[in-house]
Image (cartoon, rainbow, N blue to C red):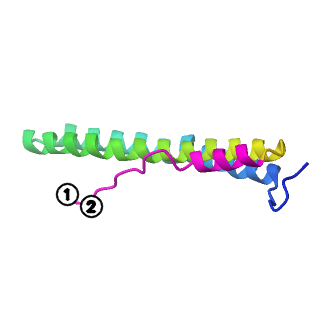
Amino acid sequence: MALKGWDIEPHGVADVLGKVTHQVAGGEGLAGEARRFGNNVKGAAEATQSKIITHALGEFFNDYSRTLLGMGAKTFSCVTGASKATKAYLLADREMAEQAQQSAIHAPAPRIKAVGQ
C-alpha cells in the first residue's frame, strides 16, 4: 500500500542507488580516482629531488584525502537515507519515511578548499 501523496517507484530508486554506489565505490568511480590520485602523488613525490616538494605533496595528499573521504561518507549517508525512506514508504509508514528521508542530510558536507587555502 502506497502512501497518499507520494509517488515513488522503488525499483527505480534501487536502480539509481545502485548506480550511485557503483560510481562512488567502483574502480572507475570516486574510489578508483582516489587510488589513482594517491598513486600519482606518490609517484611525483618519489620523482622529485626536493625534500620541500616531497613534504608539500605529502601535506596536500593528506588534506585532499580527507575531502575525498568526506565526499564518500556524504554520498553513502544519502544513499542509506534514501534506501530507508523507500523501505518505509513500502511499509506505508509516513512518519518513518520522513525521518529516514531527513536523516540522509545529517552527514557533514565535505569541506572543499580552494587552491591556496
Q: Amino acid at mark 2?
A: Ala
Q: Which residue extends farthest right?
A: 1
Q: Are marks 1 and 2 in contact (CB under 8 Å)?
A: yes
Of 24 and 117, nearer the camera is: 117
Q: Which residue is mark 1?
A: 117
Would you say residue 28 is visible in this rendering? no
Query: Is residue 63 or residue 2 the one in the foreground?
Result: 2
The answer to whether residue 34 of the structure is visible from this angle is yes
User: Which residue does the image show at 10% across and 41% down from the upper left?
Assistant: 49
Where residue 88 sits, quadrant-wise, is top right
Residue at 74% across / 51% down in the picture?
A: 13
Q: Which residue is mark 2?
A: 114
In three-dimensional space, the C-alpha distance between marks 1 and 2, rounded to whole angstroms, equals 6 Å
Q: Amino acid at mark 1?
A: Gln
Which quadrant would residue 27 be assigned to in this image? top right
Which element type, helix, strand or loop, lies under badge 2? loop
78 horizontally vs 115: left or right: right
Residue 20 point in image, percent of width and height: 62, 49
The crowd level at tag 2 (other Cα within 10 Å; few <14, some 14-19, many 20+) is few
Q: Position of residue 83 (x, y in %)?
A: 69, 43
